[in-house]
Image: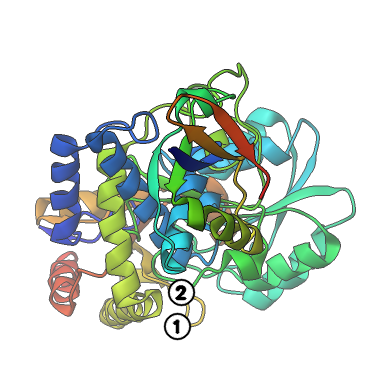
Amino acid sequence: MIYLDNGATTLLKPKSVSRASAYAIRHYASPGRGGYRAAMEAAEEVYNCRELAAKLFDTQPDQIAFTLNATHGLNVAIKSLIGPGDRVVVSGFEHNAVMRPLVAIGADVVIAGRRLFDPDGAVEEFSEAITPETKAVICNHVSNVFGYILPVEKIAEICKEREIPFILDASQSAGCMEISHRDLGAAFIAMPGHKGLYGPQGTGILVCGQLGKTLLEGGTGSQSELLTMPEFLPDRQEAGTHNVTGICGLAKGLEFVLAQGPVHILRHEQRLIEKAVEGLADMPYVHCYAGNSCTQAGVLSFNVEGMDCEEVGQYLAQHDIAVRAGLHCAPVAHESAGTDKTGTVRVSVGAFNSKRDIAAFLGKMKKLHR
Amino acid sequence: MYECYLTFRSITPCQQAQRYLTGQSLRSQLLRTPKSIAFKGCGYSLKLNDTAIGLAAAKLRQANISYGSAYRIYSDGRVEELYL
């Protein structure tokens, strides 16, 4: 199989990831609950993962809370800061992991920056939309549909100046872009462990700039005489037994990313996307949504004239090429780009893809209209 | 005879403190807080040498790593809180 659906999950991972998870399931007990060897060793591995994440995201280990995925982290962040009727400014490229909680809460959602691959325009629109009444700003770092790199550093700067909490959705950027929690001053940064951090599914990280409300309550192995959740991190956001097998795998994924360097991984992915765009440009029946190396990461959307995106996805699947078609759980992003009626076909690459994968994909695309 | 402990409210700050102290060449043992000094239920502690506990506490304060309290537990079960 040629796997080009890394925006959903990086299926190709360092071998050390599955080895670490397999070792953990055989040897580790619950961390932070006992004093015996299997529990203490589990706790050591969990803390090791916190330290690696803290290093990658330029923060302190106790500000790293483990979650189930990015959606879990975003729900904690959003429900900590936003209530019914509160004004929230979001980008025009948000995923439903942001939009659905906001709609469920009944927030007053203002969308800024809807033009694709226009970061300067986005900064201007955010600056206008953020008013003293704004309770929070939420921004996707990289669009999961178009790979558009949003100018989150500048948006975070505006938030800092105006003392408005900033939430970053780093679902597509964690692991392939430099993210400094210290520099951004974000209230929360949410991300999955199973995409650009190369960890197993069922893992995620919420970088916490503040305590936040609890989404779940339960045992933490600390302050057990209290019937309320601890008022300190990370325990407040980590009710119940940790996903130790997942976290051990995630630690190996983080080690891989730290060794490669996010900038190196991004450049590799961008080269592959550039090659795909060049190849698709020779096919007049294909329309690509392409930016440049400053505005697009390792994700590319396209459509084929006269074909439904799902048909294209199915055709590629029949040739053992894995891509994703449809709305990608991001109808707002499709509305912004004018593809909400059609959807798109999405190619998303990772560190383990090669030029050969792109060549194979292009080869099948050439045969599509013959 | 006695043993000296710095207590922590949870395992994560205890681990953070132990790694910091190890980096400062101060050895410690991480373990469950003994019942006699676990006044707020479950917790973890660092067991240190009597000669090292004062320096360790000072270094943690300097590094803004907070600990709960410091104790000496005597072999006959008596507990003495240390004000370091």
Three-letter code for the amino acid on which mark 2 is drawn: Gln
A278 vs A205, nearest the viewer: A205
Q: Is residue A352 left or right of residue A130?
A: left
Q: Is residue A334 above or below residue A39?
A: below
At x 45% / y 83%, what residue is drawn? A293
| Residue on which the image places disc 1 | A293
Q: Residue A255 at x, y = what percent?
A: 29, 65
| Residue on which the image places disc 2 | A296
Instruction: Give the spatial CA distance, label 1 vs label 2.
Output: 6 Å
Q: Residue A62 at x, y = what percent?
A: 53, 50
- Looking at the rendered structure, the secondary structure element under dot 1 is loop
Pointer 1 indicates a residue of which chain? A
Q: Is residue A92 above or below residue A367?
A: above
Three-letter code for the amino acid on which mark 1 is drawn: Ser
Q: Residue A351 at x, y = what percent?
A: 25, 70
Q: Is residue A122 above or below residue A49?
A: below
Residue A338 in view here:
no
- Looking at the rendered structure, the secondary structure element under dot 2 is loop
